[in-house]
Image: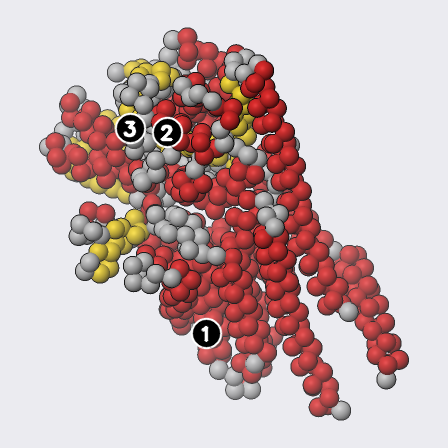
Amino acid sequence: MTAMKQARRLRKATVNSFINYAIVIVAFIILQILLGQDMISNSIQSMLVPVCCYIVMAVSLNLTVGILGELSLGHAGFMSLGAFSGIIVSTALKDVVEAEPLRLLLAMLVGAVMGGIGGVIVGLPVLRLRGDYLAIVTLAFGEIIKNVIMVLYVGIDGDGLHMATKEANLTLAEDGIAIIKGPMGAVGVTKIASFTAGFILILVTLFVVQNLVDSRAGRAILSLRDNRIAAESCGINVTKYKLMAFVVSAVLAGAAGALYGLNYSSTVASKFDFNTSILVLVYVVLGGLGSIRGSIIAAAILTMLPEMSFMRSSSLKDYRMLLYAVILILVMLASNNPVLRNAFGSVSKKFKSSKKQEGGAAQ
Amino acid sequence: MKKFIAMLMAAAMMMAMVACGNTASNNGGNNGSNNSGSADEGGSTDGTVVIRIGGIGPLTGGNAVYGVATQLGAQVAVDEINALGGPIQFEYNFQDDTGVAETAVSAYNTLKDWEADIIYGCTTTAPCVTVAAETFADRYFQLTPSASSTDVTEGKDNVFQMCFTDPNQGVTAADYISANSLGTKIGVIYNNGDAYSTGIAEAFIAHAAEIGLEVVATETYPSDSNTDYNVQLNACKDAGADLVFLPIYYTPASLILAQASAMGYAPTFFGADGMDGILTMEGFDASLAEGLMLMTPFNADATDDATVNFVESYKKLSGDVIPNQFAADGYDCIYAIYAALQNIDGLADMDHEALCEALIAAFTAEDFSVDGLTGSGMSWSTNGEISKDPVVVVIQDGAYVTM
């Protein structure tokens, strides 16, 4: 009996994961069909890749905030690391690796590794802190990354990569090109990001996060969130599992950053500031802490909302950001409103009971 | 079942979003084709051509003051030209980019869906660099009123600037200070987190070394949200700087002036065009700016007819805000486009790509020059940079006086 129950419970988690894959795949197929028939406006087309990046950002941040239960306010810092290292790799390998998808893959891998290194550097000392302290340190990390990249000049020539903190100190050979130019950011980047790459990155992210959560390590991480002392008394290594979740989250953010950076011809470090971190946190909170599906849907809708053509129409465009803020507040209120919650609850209960009856009838 | 519903809803939302964007854009498209259709028909009967100008700039966020100025400045010009009732009529749609590159690309694509013919903008540099790469690939003619980095135009034949480039301003400032011996020991305070500020400062410092101007202190701060500049001012004071060059925007500059005055440090302050607007800043004691020199191509207190008319029309649109040079640059952009369009034959049959090539040819033509609010005899080189005379003004009794 207990074995059966366990099997059912496991199956439920698996089904849940597969529904998430299905949503992403179906959305991708629908969009591809519409793209093929040229039925999607330019403005939506231009948002497909950033939406993919933000979905990955939201899902990965959910791992830290929703599943590990630690507040991180520096997620954009990892994205920034990934974006700029991805841009450097892509530019440096331009002549070596001709195939764009392969170069994009390499850039995203390096971006992911850089994000991961950043995650370890921040995570090791910081994850000993809890709650507000962690939030403040991650916030500072994001700002440090931003400010470092703002004074960083990176160039490449025949001799390899050169770095300096002043433009005058960056001495390049004749054929050299400056990749990152301090506050000007990375300019003249070849755009190689594609919607398909974004789609695959989302699937990989879902695969990594969902399997991690369902694994033995994932249960340890969840137990840390629910009761750290009890988990510790059971012999769970707090730092190890916290670091595991945090670094996986940073790795995914780095890959998303590389994709994002290679989707624009220029990128500035100030884009990845505190506001971007908060924006991703908003997606996670509105989607529901710990809910992967919620993060996907919230990130997709909230990224596209202020850019929708009705928001940019002549009658509404002056109130665009105001409307966006109002909608955010309304959604937040609605999702916390007990009346609405009960209404949704009773609807889903009805479905559940009818399902049970069906199940009973079948047996 | 619950999950099925959730999935269904998610799919429905996705569809609704796509459909929503789609219908709206289709409407836009239909409107567009109807309009251009009627324009074409009109072309054969009364010769009227409607050109759609899509503008991009920050209408919200920290840079909104510049975006709104460029939006309304161009609006004044569009209204004037349309009121003339000539054969060229403009339709104008200005989209918000919040000063962020990502949003600017969305705004640009919205304008593409609206079937814009010409892109006017972006107001700020970083979004403009990104959008310029897009317009270059898509072949839209682009004229920016105020994005001043050389990266905006570099390698793109379709992008033109109405403002000076950053290095150009730095070099001009150094030359001017040296030629008029305004100072012997120069201090520089700039925002090293900002491309505009860094671009001018680096060119200034490099050129100062060439012409033998002594820079005794180079101080930086990381962001315009900085509020304490005592460290930077003290460093300049200790180094004995008698002129402090401030290639920064006026918000931090207002704090620098106030803090310098509080510590009893009174060198000559010299700013670039970002300083324009300091006198109209709310809560700023204009007496602090007395003697401040800045380079600006536009003086709202000028008494020539063109400026007086512009200031009057602008005030009507903006609710009594006095236009700054961003507004004047915007106004000149529209007139420059108008002047160039008049030199092009067969406008009615052109799509945006043909128009782009024709406008590039018109702007870089030997004999093409425009007289505007921000300069007379303005002309453009093939790399998109403008050539016009810089004007240095000094603030006396709360008003600009041209030097």
Query: Label 3 is placed on what type of residue?
Result: Ser
Where is residue B24? Give x, y as percent.
65, 40
Q: Which mark is residue B360?
A: 2
Q: Which element type, helix, strand or loop, lies under badge 3?
A: loop
For marks 2 and 3, give the CA distance: 10 Å
Q: Residues within 10 Å of mark 1 (few under 14, many from 20)?
A: many
Residue B13 visible in the picture: yes
Dot 1 lies on which element?
Answer: helix
Asked if residue B395 can be seen in this view, the reply is no
The residue carrying mark 3 is B381
Image mark 2: chain: B
Instruction: Report the residue at 43% width, 18% height from top.
Output: B342
The residue tagged with tag 2: helix, strand or loop? Answer: helix
Location of residue A12 with respect to B291 vertically, above or below: below
Q: Nearer the viewer, mark 3 or mark 1?
A: 3
For disc 1, the chain is A
User: B30 or A249, which is in the foreground?
Assistant: B30
| Left or right, residue A111 beside residue A224 | left
Which numbered tag is attached to residue A243?
Answer: 1
Return the x and y of residue A96 as percentages of the image width and height: 29, 63
Cα separation, mark 3 vs mark 1, equals 56 Å
Question: Nearer the N terminus, badge 2 or badge 3?
Answer: 2
Taking depth in this image into account, of A130 and A286 the one nearest to the observer is A286
User: Which mark is in front, 1 or 2?
Assistant: 2
